[in-house]
């Protein structure tokens, strides 16, 4: 009997089995998993992103609207009687405080990444000037708070200002109604201590936008000027 031939036939299945194993284990079942699912290599960890709550009670955003209107018919009281007076130009202003729904500083690998402040636009009501005059700063025809209940101020970063060591230039993005625009404004930034020099403990600054350019009240052709001045105070709760 040819024992050499029998040995080759006996070893043949083991030979093909060893040749078919490429050593790649990505699609092999997990030996510790009894469900029979395919083993998946672990994904890399997510970036080390952290957040710091901004103190809502100590923070505030106030808005002053200055409006100038032409060709106004106004009713005034003269000697106890109401008289209609036509004025070529009328200017007035009013203030309101915007409620902050939530606000955070965001860090990436313990470095400042951005800040996000969400404003409750429903907190802005129609304002009275004097006894009967009203500014439509919060009604549906102006900021449309029912359709757009929130607005967002996003702090993108800080730059130095030439010849001004007391303030930094804040680069931000403002989203009101369906308009988003990049803005920048000088602000005073305070830090808790040297160990927390990347995240401000307090930011104080103000900026203004043109309501006509933002098309807040496009149907009113009599509006000559419509400026909104925002005063921002953000205080970090955690230090």
Image (cartoon, grey):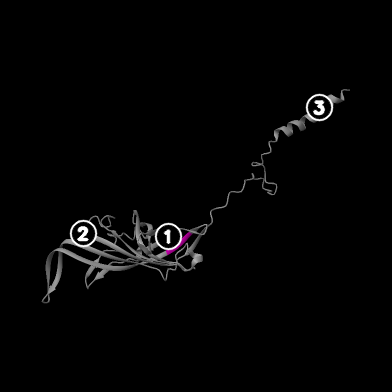
Q: Which residue is mark 2?
A: 223
For the residues carrying marks 3 and 1, which lies nearer the camera in this image?
A: 1
Q: Mark 1 and 2 residues: CB-CB less than 8 Å, in contact?
A: no
Q: Which residue is mark 1?
A: 116
Residue at 22% x, 67% y is 92
Is residue 117 rendered to the left or right of residue 137? right
Per the image, label 3 sits on a secondary structure element best described as helix
Disc 1 crowd rating (10 Å Cα; few below 14, some 14-19, many 20+) is some
Instruction: Give the residues drawn in magenta, as a range.
Output: 102-106
* Magenta span dominant secondary structure: strand
Residue at 77% x, 33% y is 14
Q: Which mark is residue 8?
A: 3
Q: Mark 3 and 1 residues: CB-CB less than 8 Å, in contact?
A: no
Q: CA distance from mark 3 to mark 2?
A: 99 Å
- Total of numbered circles in the picture? 3
Name the outermost residue toward the front: 163
Is residue 203 rendered to the left or right of residue 42? left
């Amino acid at each position: 009997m040819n024992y050499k031939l029998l040995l080759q036939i006996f070893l043949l299945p083991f030979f093909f089995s060893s040749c078919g194993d490429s050593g790649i284990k990505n699609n092999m079942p997990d030996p510790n998993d009894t469900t029979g699912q395919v083993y998946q290599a672990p994904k890399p960890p997510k970036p080390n992103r952290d957040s710091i709550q901004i103190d809502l009670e100590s923070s505030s955003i106030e808005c002053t609207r200055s409006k100038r209107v032409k060709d106004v018919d106004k009713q005034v009281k003269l000697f106890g009687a109401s008289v209609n007076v036509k004025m070529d130009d009328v200017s007035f202003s009013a203030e309101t405080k915007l409620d902050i729904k939530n606000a955070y500083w965001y860090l990436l690998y313990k470095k400042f990444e951005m800040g996000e402040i969400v404003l409750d636009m429903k907190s802005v009501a129609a304002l009275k000037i004097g006894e009967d005059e009203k500014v439509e700063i919060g009604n549906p025809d102006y900021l449309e708070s029912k359709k757009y209940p929130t607005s967002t101020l996003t702090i993108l970063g800080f730059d130095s200002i030439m010849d001004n060591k007391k303030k930094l230039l804040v680069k931000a993005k403002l989203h009101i109604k369906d308009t988003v625009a990049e803005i920048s404004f000088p602000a005073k930034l305070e830090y808790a201590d040297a160990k927390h020099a990347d995240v401000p403990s307090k930011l104080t600054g103000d900026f203004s936008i043109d309501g006509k350019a933002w098309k807040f009240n496009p149907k009113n052709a009599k509006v000559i000027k419509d400026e909104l001045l925002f005063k921002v105070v953000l205080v970090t709760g955690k230090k």
